[in-house]
Image (tube, rainbow, N blue to C red):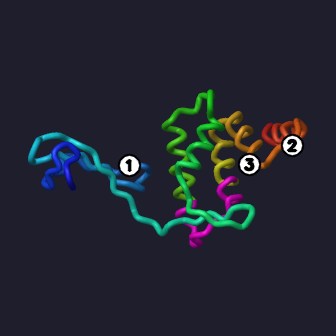
Amino acid sequence: MRCPYCNNHDDKVVDSRSCRDGQAIRRRRECVGCGQRFTTYEYIEHAPLTVIKRDGNREPFDRAKLQRKIELACYKTSVSTDEMEELMDQVEADLGNRAEKEVPSQHIGEVVMERLKRLHDVAYVRFASVYRQFKDRQDFVRELEQLAN
């Protein structure tokens, strides 16, 4: 691993631990050349996931896009950045565990809504309103009634 400070290729691992529910390994490294410490992460490389959009188009799964949508739903709520990160990790793990490497966008939306419902009611309703394309307040009322049951 090349040192980000001096570009030396020689380092030693000083700490190693599992993170992200066992989906990654965090390694703390120390450069033998300059003595600076830095962190690296190891992940299992999965086959790329393709999202099938509602119109039939296909595009690569984009974690940053999912993150933006979840952040919008959680804006000005009590949901922490760590909780959002955990939610994205869980969604990505759910999708990665599927046998198929093409997943309909509707499935992703349902998985996110299921997890948001358990995390925060307001974030869930915000996400659902965009995902399900609520047209009027009756759509909101129906969703809130279902949430209350």
Residue 69 position by quadrant: top right
Q: Which residue is mark 2?
A: 135
Say the numbered circle drawn on residue 19: 1
Q: Is residue 96 magenta?
A: yes
Residue located at (62% from left, 63% from top): 51
**Does residue 16 appear to the left or right of 7 in the view shown?**
right
Residue 98 position by quadrant: bottom right
Residue range in magenta is: 95-109
Amino acid type, residue under disc 1 in the picture: Cys
Q: Which residue is mark 3?
A: 131
**Does residue 54 appear to the left or right of 139 in the view shown?**
left
Mark 1 / mark 3, whichever is N-terminal: 1
Amino acid type, residue under disc 3 in the picture: Tyr
State which quarter of the image contains the N terminus.
Answer: bottom left
Nearer-the-camera pick, 94 or 49 = 49
**Residue 17 visible in the picture:** no
